[in-house]
Amino acid sequence: MKSFSRASLLISTLLTASTAFGQSYLVAPAGSGGSIFPARASIAEVAQSTAPSHKAWELSLIPLFAAQGLDAASSWGHIETNPLMAGSNGTFGAKAAGIKIAFVAGAATAEYLLLKKHPAWQTLFVRLNEGNAILTTGFAVHNFIVVH
């Protein structure tokens, strides 16, 4: 049963990552004469075309926080090599999760404040958040496969 849960977790993680950073499908406009298949657009393109200027950045925070949560779940109760994050018994626990949440929330707040002053940096922050989420998801998947 344990190997089934690892496989399920891996599959759901990969599907979540592909949904978050893959292509989203949009319905082709009526009378456009296009094919029966919908047009393809990335999340950032959809957000740019349908929402205020910060929408793409706001959407990039969802997979970022989800990936951090997944990484915390994959490390919970196991030996933590980072001395700042390790609890009194050397494992990842509530202290480490709190530090992780505070760090990511602080980074998101800094991005928000910088975007208010420099809106042109939105694409940069969206790409950084996507890259961070992909990398962190990879670490979490590795932890679930190796540690569990």
Image: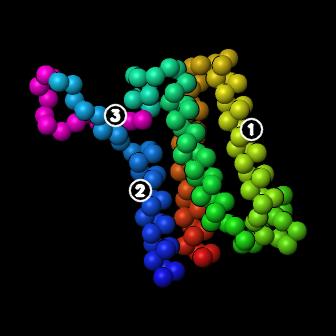
Please tell me whether mark 3 sits on a helix, a strand or a loop: strand
Q: Which residues are magenta?
A: 31-43
Q: Residue at 64% of width from left, 63% of height from top? A: 73
Image point (41%, 56%), residue name = 15
Q: Which quadrant would residue 23 be assigned to in this image?
A: top left
Answer left or right for 113 relative to 142. Answer: right
Which of the 4 image quarters holds residue 57?
A: top right
Q: Tell me: residue 93, above or below residue 135.
A: below
Tell me if residue 16 is in the magenta stretch: no
From the image, tell me which residue sits under label 1: 106
Q: Position of residue 71 (x, y in %)?
A: 63, 59
Residue occupying the point 64% across, 23% down: 115
Look at the image and tell me whether residue 123 can be seen.
no
Q: CA distance from mark 2 to mark 1?
A: 28 Å
Q: Residues within 10 Å of mark 2 (few under 14, many from 20)?
A: few
34 inside magenta stretch: yes
Q: Which residue is mark 3?
A: 41
For marks 3 and 1, the one nearer the N-term is 3
Q: Mark 3 is on which residue type?
A: Ala
Q: Residue at x 72, y 72 (%)?
A: 78
Residue of label 2:
15
Type of amino acid at the residue the image marks with label 1? Gly
**Mark 2 is on which residue type?**
Leu
